[in-house]
Amino acid sequence: MQPDAVQEVLAGLKEAGVSLACYLPDSLFRGLYPALDTDPDIRTIRVTNEGEGAAICGGVFLSGKRAVLVMENSGLRASIEPLARMGMGAGIPVVMIMSYRGELGENNWWAIPHGMTMEPLLDAMRIPHRIVTKKADIRRAITDAYAWSYAAYYHSAVCLGGEVVR
């Protein structure tokens, strides 16, 4: 991620009132994690899997604060069960920011299935999402995701691809 894209993510999270970020590192967001870790307004928790991160973010919601789950889109598969229980069963929203692995232009064979499964899984879970490929659209996508999720009491996702992560 380019430094200006990282700054747009941080600005969007702060504008949305996020105070905690859970993440499982991936290479496309390698510039984002140090910025999150050193930001005085956002506490970070590194998780061992994305399902754990979703559960922590749900707990943060119950405490009256806002959290974000930052992950590679492959993590969606690992977090489906906690997301289903919290969103469909209890109305506990989790906002996700995902790197879009496997989109057109991907040159790693192992990442292609991530792109093939991301949108069908989001659609199956009825999770609205926005694919952002321009830096100028990052902040608005993040604030829109929080506005929608906290009105609907359901999850949303911002998927960062294209020039935003390459």
Image (cartoon, rainbow, N blue to C red):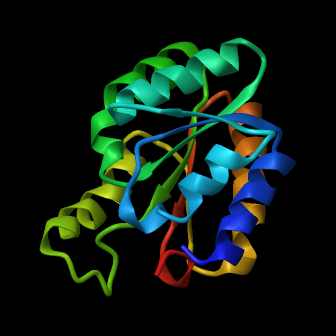
Q: Name the residue nearer the viewer: 19 or 64.
A: 19
Q: Name the residue nearer the viewer: 33 or 54.
A: 33
The image position of residue 137, as x and y in percent, is 72, 73
Which residue shows up at 63% across the image and 81% down it? 134
Q: So how many labels did they put on this image?
A: 0
Query: In this picture, is 99 found above or below 112?
Result: above
Q: Which quadrant of the figure has residue 51?
A: top left
Which residue shows up at 40% across the image and 39% down it? 125
The image position of residue 119, as x and y in percent, is 37, 58
Which residue shows up at 41% across the image and 31% down it? 47
Which residue shows up at 74% across the image and 67% down it? 8
The image position of residue 161, as x and y in percent, is 48, 73
Q: Which quadrant of the figure has residue 3?
A: bottom right
The image position of residue 38, as x and y in percent, is 69, 47
Query: In this picture, is 68 found above or below 131?
Result: above
- Residue closest to the far left: 109
* Side of 124 where 4 appears, left or right: right
Q: Quadrant of the N terminus?
A: bottom right
Query: In this picture, is 29 found above or below 56?
Result: below
